[in-house]
Each structure stands twice: as C-alpha cells, then as structure tokens.
Amino acid sequence: MAQGEAILRFYAELNDLLPAHRRREKEHLFRFAGKNTVKDAIEAYDIPHTQVDLILVNEKPVTFDYLLQPGDRVAVYPVFESMDIAGVTALRPAPLRRTAFILDVHLGKLARLMRTAGLDTLYRNDYSDAEIIRTALEENRIILTRDKGILKHRVVTHGHWIFATRPRDQFVEVLRRFDLQDALQPFTRCTWCNAPLQPVNKEEIEHRLEPMTRENYTLFMRCPVCDRIYWQGCHYQKMKTRLDEMIREAAG
C-alpha cells in the first residue's frame, strides 16, 4: 500500500480546536496510507468539517473529498465572517433559507437566551446525537454543540462547535458567527418550548394573574403550546437591558 506524507496548517481560531499539545506547532505532518480525503486528515486533528470554510492544497481550492497526494501542502481556514468566498470553493450546500437551530444537551442556558432573542431554537436535555442530526437534516437546522464528535458525521452540513463556556459569551459568539444582529425579534418566542407567542386579551387570562400584575399591566402574550403567559414586567426590563448589552458587544 502506498505511503505518503502531507503538511497541514490551520489558521485563526481553528488552532484553538487542536489538541493542546499541537497548538504550538505551525505545521503538522500527516502520514497516510492508501486513499485518504482531506476531510479525513482535518478531522484526524479533532477539527469538525463544519468549522472549515476554505481548503487550499498547493495553493488551489479543493473540496472535502479531495484525495491527498504525497507532498501536498494543505492550508485550512475557518469561516470567513466578512469575506465572500463563494466563488472560490463550496464545501457545503448553499446557506439555509432560514436561520433555525438545534442545540445539544450541554447548551440549555444558551437555548433560553436565543429564544428570548426570538431565534428559532430547539433544545431538550435528553436529545441523542442521532436525534439531533436527524432533526437538523429534516428541518434544515444548524447544529450548535460543545461536542465535536456530532459535527464529524459526514451527513452533517451546517453546524458550529461553541468555543465559549459561559452562556453570555456563547450567545455573543453565535450572533457574531451567523451575523444575526439584524435577525433578532426579542420576546416573541416562548423561552420554555420555542413556540411563537400570540397576543391574548387580558380578560381571558386575568383569573390567572397575581393581583399586582393584574393591576399594573395591560398587554400580555401567551404561548399556544405550553400556555405560559408573558408580560413586560420587571424581569422583562432586566432581560432587555442584558440582551441589548450582548447585542452591542456582538456588533462591536
């Protein structure tokens, strides 16, 4: 069986995804036998293919199924946030027509922040990897995860490994990564079940309200799925201030 070596170099934040002992190396020697795709090589360094937007082999763009040749020099670049490289190479299908997400079991607090901001976000704390992948493909959703393994499945086309560990920082990261600042519609989704909220007449639900709420507020929204009621009370003002701060940070 033919033996070969290729040199790989990872750019920008892709270096943060490398195993710790490899982050100080600028170039990485990849030894292979037989047929190995460039996708195989990249994921051998623990980098999911969904994090990659451009691959150059010997300074020419290639796709994930390119078969490595002995002596190849491979440059791997992350998602470009401010540069259109669609004319250079296409590593995955066209962007999804709508921006909708499904989150893994590690990202419950992020899910609530995203729903509060009006982003279509599926989450359950008992999702299996197979269920996340199937739902993402069937409903054209982007997978957000802290588990690199789920993004390495060949069928996954749209996903992102979350770098940050704090929910606040994770939310800012998602806004920046997907350029969502202009797509937000805060306080239009149920933070518990993700359903779009609907206006409801106060008369219909005032028997469920606390006396102070009934006396001081007139505008209410109700979730048509789980029947929770929302209004612009003290918690709303605090959450709005928090959201505004995170949105400004993402745009800065």
Image (cartoon, helix red, strand yellow):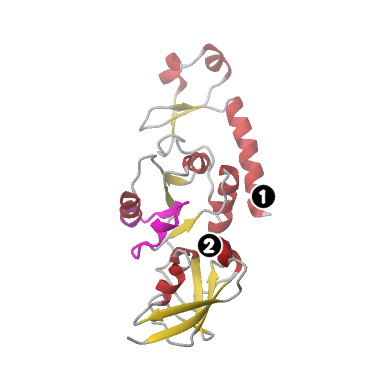
Foreground disc of the pair 2, 1: 2
Q: The N terminus appears in which quarter of the rendering?
A: bottom left
Local secondary structure at mark 2: loop
x 43%, y 45%: residue: 121
Between the C-alphas of marks 2 and 1, the distance is 29 Å
Residue 45 placement (x, y as % from top left)? 48, 67
Q: Which mark is residue 51?
A: none
Q: Which residue is mark 2?
A: 19
* Numbered disc 1: secondary structure: helix
- Residues marked 2 and 1 touching at CB (< 8 Å): no
- Name which residue type carries label 2: Pro
Image position of 109 with respect to 19: above or below: above
Q: Which residues are magenta?
A: 137-156
Residue occupying the point 38% across, 82% down: 67
The answer to which quarter of the image holds residue 199 is top left
Looking at the picture, tell me which residue is in the foreground, 18 or 59.
18
Q: Of all residues shown, which one is farthest toward the right?
A: 252
Give whichever of 203, 18 is nearer the camera.
18
- Residue 155 highlighted magenta (yes or no): yes
The quadrant of the image that shows the C terminus is bottom right
- Disc marking residue 249: 1
Q: For label 2, count other residues whose C-alpha is less than 10 Å away and answer few (under 14), some (14-19) or many (20+).
A: few
Q: Is residue 244 above or below residue 228?
A: below
- Where is residue 32 drawn, in percent x and y? 41, 79
The one nearer the camera, 240 or 55, is 55
Residue 26: x, y in percent? 61, 74
Q: Amino acid at mark 1?
A: Glu
